Image (spheres, helix red, strand yellow):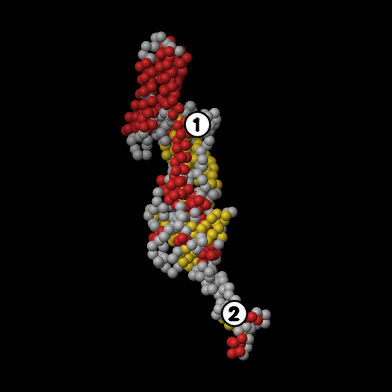
């Protein structure tokens, strides 16, 4: 609001100051000749802006920019040029330097013409009345880390002479920013714009609309933003093989793979059967052989198979992550989902009956959701994994059941839970799965960080970018403190998941 107020004042205030200081311009020939022309141009500009303001106020609608936004036409370069032109006129009137008056007249005159032309040909909803802007992110159903493309179809937009159409959007929260520009040659035509968005990030994405505006070719003025072109697409999580998942099924494994007991032939209680040539003679039970009057051998018993029913619970309860600007919360949740689904697939392949459990959105509310997982039908599990977000409404205890089924919790912050429920924990440490935040460009006194002429070279934008990066690092430190876990005494015998060459390695916590 303060920046807009300053820009609106810039439309009038510099000219009034210059006019007050240069009232007596007879001593300066250039000012004496150009003053009536400048005054006429300023009056025309002011009249056009007033008319535009009144029309916008009469046509006030929630989807249209406000009346004040309709006359907020100056860019940062335009405001600087307005003040510089007025300053040159003031300095010329004081010093009598004719070259300064030429600079001032050209600067203010150019600004008056640019603002007037913008308000007349590009103001209001005239350029957008027949506009049809559609946006697609392809493929609409992608896998994590696949390359995404954005396709924007623009048709019917009126681009006046001397103006350009600009569009900016971001399809994913931490994804790349897409930028487009069209010259007046594309006015009213149907144009297809396409760009690559980089690697796909897991989730069900509803992209915010593109921000579109018209600006003059000199970059001095611009129209208010118009929001058009939403898109929806889904990125399924990528499955990673899990090493050591069979150990989570206790010593007995599953019903299909029973483990023999490792005992000596003279130990324990054994089953008996008749001797077959080739059997180990040390296993002959001589007492029973005498009783049955035939050779009988002892067979080692097997450890009974483990319960094949497993509830695999994903702990996604965490509050306040939407307020953090760093990438770590999303990256950690993506890692949790990959370990969760990869572990479920490994257990299913080992013969266990796995049920995926987590909290996800349904009909506008976060509720516990469970899905049975089968080896040949991972699509439902992947769809559920794409829907998972950090949520504060369903605690971990709401996802657990007092049932005889084995329950395994995949979490980034294990903690003590009240109740008799026995759990197995698979911990996904934040430090092992999230890289460091990106550092800013090195500051240099003699070298610009961007090509010459780029708006990003302005000191205000550089300061804003430095503050953004500093905020990211502060948020990352805060998130690391919230998510860290140091109490290993309650996790003895459980497992920690770490990345290893494109796989997930489970390591027992001793």
Query: Which class describes the residues within 10 Å of circle 1: few (<14), some (14-19), or many (20+)?
Result: some
Q: Is residue 123 above or below residue 294?
A: above
Measuring 54% from the left and 47% from the top, which residue is drawn there? 199
Q: Is residue 328 above or below residue 296?
A: above
Instruction: Give the mark toward the camera: 1 or 2.
Output: 2
* Image position, residue 502 (x, y; %): 57, 54
**Furthest-right residue in view?**
278
The image quadrant of residue 505 is: bottom right
> Mark 1 sits on what residue?
457
Mark 1 / mark 2, whichever is N-terminal: 2
- Kindly state the secondary structure of the residue where label 2 is placed: loop
The image quadrant of residue 451 is: top right
Q: How many marks?
A: 2
> Mark 2 sits on what residue?
266
Q: Nearer the viewer, residue 256 or 214?
A: 256
Residue 113 appears in the rendering:
no
* Image position, residue 118 (x, y; %): 42, 28
Measuring 48% from the left and 65% from the top, which residue is drawn there? 310
Left or right of residue 26: residue 381: right
Residue 61 appears in the rendering:
yes
* Image position, residue 3 (x, y; %): 38, 31
Separation of residues labelled 1 and 2 (CA atoms): 83 Å
């Amino acid at each position: 609001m303060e920046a807009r107020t300053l820009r609106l004042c810039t439309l009038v205030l510099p000219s009034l100051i210059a006019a007050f200081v240069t009232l007596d311009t007879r001593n300066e020939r250039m000012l004496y000749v150009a003053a009536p022309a400048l005054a006429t141009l300023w009056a025309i500009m002011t009249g056009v802006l007033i008319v535009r303001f009144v029309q916008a106020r009469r046509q006030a609608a929630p989807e249209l920019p406000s009346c004040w936004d309709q006359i907020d036409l100056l860019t940062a370069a335009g405001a600087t040029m307005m003040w510089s032109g007025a300053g040159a006129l003031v300095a010329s009137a004081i010093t009598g330097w004719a070259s300064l008056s030429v600079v001032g007249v050209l600067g203010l005159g150019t600004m008056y013409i640019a603002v007037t032309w913008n308000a007349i040909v590009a103001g209001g909803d005239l350029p957008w009345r027949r506009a049809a802007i559609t946006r697609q992110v392809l493929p609409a159903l992608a896998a994590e880390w696949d390359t995404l493309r954005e396709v924007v179809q623009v048709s019917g937009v009126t681009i006046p002479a001397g103006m350009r159409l600009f569009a900016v959007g971001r399809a994913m929260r931490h994804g790349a920013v897409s930028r487009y520009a069209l010259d007046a040659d594309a006015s009213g035509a149907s144009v297809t714009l396409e760009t690559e968005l980089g690697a796909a990030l897991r989730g069900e994405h509803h992209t915010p609309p593109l921000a579109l505006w018209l600006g003059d070719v000199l970059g001095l003025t611009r129209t208010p933003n118009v929001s058009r072109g939403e898109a929806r697409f889904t990125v399924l999580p990528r499955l990673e093989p899990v090493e050591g998942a069979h150990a989570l099924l206790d010593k007995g494994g599953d019903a299909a793979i029973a483990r023999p007991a490792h005992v000596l032939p003279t130990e324990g209680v054994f089953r008996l059967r008749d001797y077959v040539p080739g059997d180990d003679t040390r296993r002959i039970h001589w007492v029973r052989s005498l009783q049955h009057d035939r050779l009988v051998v002892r067979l080692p018993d097997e450890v009974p198979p483990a319960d094949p029913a497993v509830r695999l619970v994903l702990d996604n309860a965490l509050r306040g992550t939407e307020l953090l600007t760093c990438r770590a919360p999303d990256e950690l949740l993506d890692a949790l989902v990959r370990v969760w689904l990869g572990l479920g697939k490994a257990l299913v392949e080992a013969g266990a009956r796995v049920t995926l459990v987590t909290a996800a959105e349904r009909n506008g509310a976060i509720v516990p959701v469970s899905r049975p997982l089968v080896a040949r039908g991972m699509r439902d599990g992947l769809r559920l994994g794409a829907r998972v977000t950090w949520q504060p409404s369903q605690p971990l205890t709401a996802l657990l059941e007092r049932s005889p089924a084995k329950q395994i919790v995949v979490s980034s912050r294990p903690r003590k839970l009240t109740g008799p429920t026995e759990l197995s924990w698979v911990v996904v440490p934040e430090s092992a799965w999230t890289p460091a935040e990106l550092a800013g460009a090195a500051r240099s006194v003699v070298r610009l960080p961007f090509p010459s002429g780029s708006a990003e070279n302005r000191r205000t934008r550089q300061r804003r970018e430095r503050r953004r990066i500093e905020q990211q690092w502060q948020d990352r430190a805060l998130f690391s403190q919230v998510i860290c876990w140091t109490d290993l005494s309650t996790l003895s015998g459980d497992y920690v998941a770490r990345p290893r060459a494109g796989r997930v390695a489970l390591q027992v916590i001793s």
